[in-house]
Each structure stands twice: as C-alpha cells, then as structure tokens.
Image: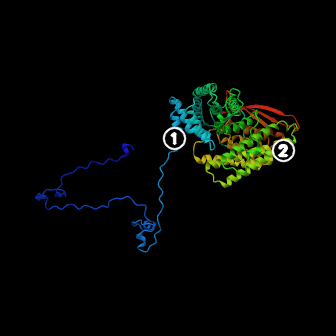
Amino acid sequence: MGADKIQILPIRRLTPTSAKPTRSPTSSSTSESSADALPAPVKKTRLGKPKVKTGCKTCKIRRVKCDETKPACDRCTSTGRTCDGYSVVLPKKPARPDTRTVVIFRSIDTMQGDRTERRALDFFTKWTAPQLAGFFDRDIWQQMVVQIGSSEPTIRHAMIALGSLSESREKSIVASPLRRTIPISDPLASKIPQFVTVEGQDDPFALIHYNKAITHLAQRMQRSDTATDIALLSCVLFVCIEMLRGEHGPAMEHFKAGMHIALGASKQKPTTPYNQMRSTRKQVMPFFYRLELLAMLTGQESQWEYPFEAMAVVPETFETLLAARDSLVHLMNLSMRHIRSLRVRRYEGDVTDEDLARQHSLLACLSSWKSAFDSLSMTKCFLPAEQRSTHILEIHYITTITWLARSDAISESSTDLYLDDFERAVSLGETLQLAALAEKTHYSTFVFDMEFVPHIYLIATKCRHPLVRRRAIAVLRSSFRREGLWDSNSSAAVAERIMQREEAGLDVTDGTEWPGESARIHNAFFDMGSGINPHMHQLTYFSKPDGLQGEWTIEQETIILQPE
C-alpha cells in the first residue's frame, strides 16, 4: 500500500494537568502529596487460551467445557444427558506444491540463453505448450518436451523458435473485413467479420533457432545410435514450426521423415536398437497417426502399410476419452485410405465386391465405436474441458461415417440424405464457439490437431441446405484459428465461393431451393496459403455440368484475402 493510502495520526504528547497524581502500586514513596491518592482500578481480563476442539459433540453444542472422559464424558452422564461421542479429527496434511509445475520451471531455469531466448522459452512454456497440449497431450507438451529440452540443444532451439513464432502470431490478429478479388453478395451471409493473421515466415530470430535445431539434430544422428527418440520428437516440433509459418510442403516432409524413423524404415541408422525407441515412440506415435490423417486430407498418399486393423482398435468399452480419441483416429485413417482408393475408380465403375465388403466392415467398426463412446459418455461425469472434447470427437465421427457411407457413390445428391447428421455437427460446432466465448479467456489461434475446422469446412461444401451450410460457414468465420494446416479464415472464404458458384441464379432466402446435380462441385482443391503471398489461394474445381456420365469440367481461379 502506498504512503498516500495510509492514515498517519499525530503524535500524542503528555501535558501536565492539575489532577492529583495517582499512586503507583509498586511505588515506595510515602510523600504526603500522594498519601490520599487511591490506585486506579485495574480492569480484569480473561487470559486467552486456544480453543479445544476435542470435546464431545453434546458439550460443544451446549458450549460448556467437556472433561473428555471416554467413551462418554462425566459432564453429560452426571446430568442425565446422552453423550453423543467425539468427532474424529484427522491430522491436517501439509500442502504439497504442484510437482509438475516445479519440474517444468526447474527445467526452464537450467536452460542457457540470453534475454530474448529465455523470453521465447517462457512464452512456449506458459502459452504455446498448454495450447498445443489441449486436453489429451499435456504430459508430452508440458512435461516431456520441456524436460528433454533442458539437456538437448535440438529440442531447446526448436522450443525457442516455436515460442517466438506463436507469440508473433497471437499478436498479429487484425479484426478487419476482408477485401476479396471476387465480391460475394449474399443476403443470408453471416455478418461476422473475418480475421487475418500475418504468418511468421520471415521471423529472423525464429529462423535462426530453427536452423540451429536442425543442425544439432544432424550432428546428434551422426554420433549416436540412440538418437531416434530425439529425432522423433524433433520431427513433431519441426512440423509445428512449419505449420505456424504456413509452409505446407516442408511440414509434410518432416512428417514423412519422422514416420519412416518411427516405423523402423530409416536407412541412415539401420543399427538402432528397436527397444531404445519404444518409450518415446509410444508417446509420440499418436502425433504421427494424426499427421497422416492431415496429409491425406491435403492430397498426400500414404506409402506404408497401416499397422492396425479396424476390428483391433475398437474395444467393447472405453475407460478414458484418450482411448476413444486414439481409436477413432485409427478408424479415420483406415476410412480415408479406403475413400481415397475409390476416388477415381468409382467414376469408372470399378468398385468391386471386396471394396464394398471393406466399406461395410469399416462402417460396422465406426458404429461399434459410437456405441462404446456413448456408453462412456453416459457413465462419466465430464468436466467442461472433457465435454468440449466429446463434442469434437462426435463431429469427427459424423463427418467420417457420412463420407465413408457414400464413398462408392458418384452422385453429389447422395449427400442430401445426411442433412440431420450435418445439422448435428454444425450445432456442436456452434456449442464449442459459445463455450469459448463464455470462458472469457484468450482463444488460441493455433493448435496442433485438427479439431473442427476441416470437418466443418467439409460440411459447408457438401451440405447444400442453404441455411445449414451458412451456419457452418459462420462457425468458420468466427473461429480465427489454424488447426494444423487448416486455416479457418481461408476455409470460410473458399466454402463461400463454392456456395456462390453452386447457388448462382437460385432463390435461397427461405432454404427450400437447393442446387441441382449439374450445378454441384464434386471436388475443390486449394492451396493452404504457403509461398510468397499467404493470403492468395488458387482454387481448382471439378464438376460434371453435362451429367454424371459426361466429361469433367475443370476450372481454376485465384482469390486474395487481405484487410481492406
């Protein structure tokens, strides 16, 4: 408290009075002037004693002293009362510090670096790592990465680069309407302004430490046969760095390199003992399975055999949400592999009985997963963060099963059968947005995992109900975040453009008029904004305006998104 807040009282000085002095009880003076004076009365006060909390319940209620005779006190029994006995007072446990937090900051304190480097490390620890961890991966991002970084320069430099890039991104949000090279006029469009972020591609400080991390890793791999653990973890960090920079190609290259190491296919260190990488591999491999899903959603092909079968990853019950998440990731990967295997053959009439049997088997496994997931949801009482995770998993399930169910169909109108499922997923997305606003906390603009942005984008492009798809676009527009390589801002703009092309000439104000089959876009590819201009997107559309048996029409255009 400042001095101006303290009330200072004036010093009270003794002044002589005409009153007769009183005689002190301890004085030996016998002067006549004080002989007649009586000593001032002394006010008696009760000596303070600590409260006794060991008395019987009856005496406590009566507020009398208990003699604490066991099993019944004499004070109660002598007056004919019933002694209600004694409460059991447990010894108070000393408060223990959060050991995880202590370990984290102790690890940070041991890291070398100048003021700027330590600031980036601090930001990574307090903000970046918790946001990357989400609900499921706290032990990896907030413990394992930080602890290993205290002794491994590769990880430490990667942490510095990530901390610097993420801090720059969090400061770069510009709440401004976007100027489009293709104007969109839509009376039903959301009025939510879109947000633009400036990527940290040219952050010199981050790039210096990123290059240092790569250099240290190369040296580590040359001199040690046990460097596979560090290589796996480094690949995950490098992927995050490239995602933050908006660089699609390098991110996927790091993913592929890490997957080859994880699967034991690295030719650089064929003598690396497998058992030396099992501990880190067990913790890091879920990242690579999720990155494979990201790769397939961006057009990449998997060059390796998936290590799990669908029936083996769905137990009868789930004990935790983490187990449900990991199981669904495997099913999504297997489903995507099947969908991509039919993406051309279905138009050529080359769908075999074996393909259909595989499709039905995957659909059955997804249904089993949903039953086990619903059982977990009914038996557990989830915290708000856990409830948010259940919404995300249900959105993933809906988009996967609806996409898989029509993987053998060539008609875009087949998606109309799943309107109720699409509406459910959009409602869950809206619930997630409302929960984020209700928390009144800063919302991260970058997360490692794909949570809902690519899934809601898929619904916005495949659900042709005018009102539901606009709700989906509104969820994207209000998110202003990047999930992996999926930017909500770009996804919303592309979905709006596809909607505009499909609905050209239609009256959609009441939601009853839908685009016809010939007007629908079967596939649309767009780059993720990497390169010279992160706000320029080249779109490629594939449609069949002359009927499903007609030739493909391929069109391209470029849209630019930037503040006005």
| Depicted 43 relative to depicted 270: above or below | below
Question: In the image shown, does 40 or 148 lie closer to the viewer?
Answer: 148
Q: Residues within 10 Å of mark 2 (few under 14, many from 20)?
A: few
**In the rendered structure, which amino acid carries the disc numbered 2?**
Ala
| Depicted 468 relative to depicted 446: above or below | below
| Depicted 419 relative to depicted 141: above or below | below
Residue 380 % position (x, y)? 65, 53
The picture quadrant where one finds residue 150 is: top right
Q: Can residue 400 be seen in this view?
A: yes
Residue 413 % position (x, y)? 82, 44
Question: In the shown orientation, is residue 302 left or right of residue 98?
Answer: right
The picture quadrant where one finds residue 301 is: top right
| Depicted 149 relative to depicted 398: above or below | above
**In the rendered structure, which amino acid carries the disc numbered 1?**
Val
Give the labeled residue for mark 2. Answer: 357
Distance from the alpha carbon under mark 2 to that under mark 1? 54 Å
Instruction: Label 2: state its secondary structure.
Output: helix
Residue 396 % position (x, y)? 72, 44
Give the labeled residue for mark 1. Answer: 102
Q: How many labels does the image show?
A: 2
Q: Which residue lies furthest to the bottom in this view?
A: 80
Marks 2 and 1, the one that precedes in the sequence:
1
Question: In the image shown, does 558 or 415 lie closer to the viewer?
Answer: 415
Name the image quarter holding the C terminus: top right
The picture quadrant where one finds residue 79 is: bottom left
Question: In the shown orientation, is residue 156 left or right of residue 28?
Answer: right
Residue in the image at 68% along x and 52% along y: 376
Instruction: Label 1: state its secondary structure.
Output: helix
Q: Can residue 464 be seen in this view?
A: no
